[in-house]
Image (cartoon, rainbow, N blue to C red):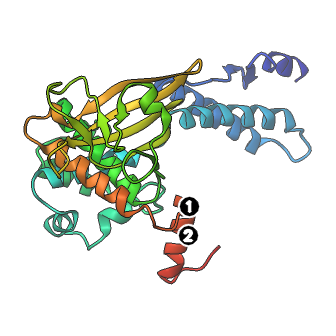
Amino acid sequence: MSRQFDEAMEGRFDLYGKEYRLIEPENIEELMQALEVKSALETHISGLMHDEDSSGYDSLLQEQTDYIREFIDSLGEFDSSTLAGNIVFLAKKHGMRVGELEDIIGVSAGYLSRTIKENSKKKISIDIVWKIAQLFGTDIKTLTEKELWISRSNTDLLERFLERLYNDTKDNFFSWEYDGGVMVMLKDRYTEMGLVTEEDDETPVYHPNHLNQALKWVLAADIVSLECFDKIKDLAIIPYKLADKDEPAGFDFIFVWEDDGRWCWEKVFYTSDDPFGSLQDDAKQLYDLIESSEFDAKLSPKVHQLISDYVKGGRPE
């Protein structure tokens, strides 16, 4: 027995004249071999007499079991966020609300919301996933793995970007800073970068390099920003208009950051890049939300959810 366990130290051992070795599976074929080794060890241990020492084999069994578990864990967990995003996207694409989709496929109201949200204990059934895939003319693999809502069109992608910013702002995930220019004192960095100058009457003149320089552009409202949106870079929104107009002509989204004591900026996108005006509408909706939230009480997303759940009748855990 000592010889067997000396060999087992190298992952090899003998049972009833047959040599085995512990398997660290990396694919389904090796997994089946590992399960065979595990089964052989379990059978051998169960057949030992009460006075026979099984500790060595128990250790081998535990090691093989651990190898199997490590392989299964390496496969990862199903990411329901992709499925959830695709269902919402496809329903919206076809002018359908999620509640209407639930009615069409014959599930109870709220079923999809309960089963596809992140960390949900109740999981959506495979037959429902199959039915949704068939309804929208796709397949299960695409529906669960490919992010359909991320469009190849830059404009569509920016629309989804603005929609995400809007929702995260509404859900209290972001706290926007007022960099000023109209109602609040303008931060020096915008004048230092040459983007804004102030006239004698304190009119904030905007100097966009992508618009007609013969026209006079001014800030339509305060510049707002999200600190460190991209590592050291702040995401800033600059609302501007023609000097003789009241309504905003556009919104410029830029990154602003400090490099070795000097302020820098770069374009993210301009709503004027979209000739059809959809980006302008979405950006205005976002900016209006930011303005309406200015004097709202500030809560972190975690605290907001806790209080919201309590108001609905829940109890703190």
- Say which residue appears at 18% left-offset and 38% top-offset: 156
Q: Are marks 1 and 2 in contact (CB under 8 Å)?
A: yes
Which SS class for mark 2?
Answer: helix
User: What type is the residue that disc 2 sits on?
Assistant: Leu
- Say which residue appears at 24% left-offset and 51% top-offset: 284
Q: Which residue is mark 2?
A: 306
Q: Which residue is mark 1?
A: 302
- Say which residue appears at 13% left-offset and 66% top-offset: 104
231 over 316 or under it: above or below: above
Mark 1 nearby-residue class (10 Å; few <14, some 14–19, many ≥20): few
Q: Is residue 295 left or right of residue 217?
A: right
Q: Is residue 2 left or right of residue 106?
A: right
Look at the image and tell me in which quarter the C terminus lies: bottom right
Q: Position of residue 227 (x, y in %)?
A: 51, 40
Q: Is residue 291 left or right of residue 214?
A: right
26 over 64 or under it: above or below: above
Q: Position of residue 24 (x, y in %)?
A: 62, 24
- Distance of label 1 from label 2 (alpha carbons): 6 Å
User: What type is the residue that disc 1 sits on?
Assistant: Lys
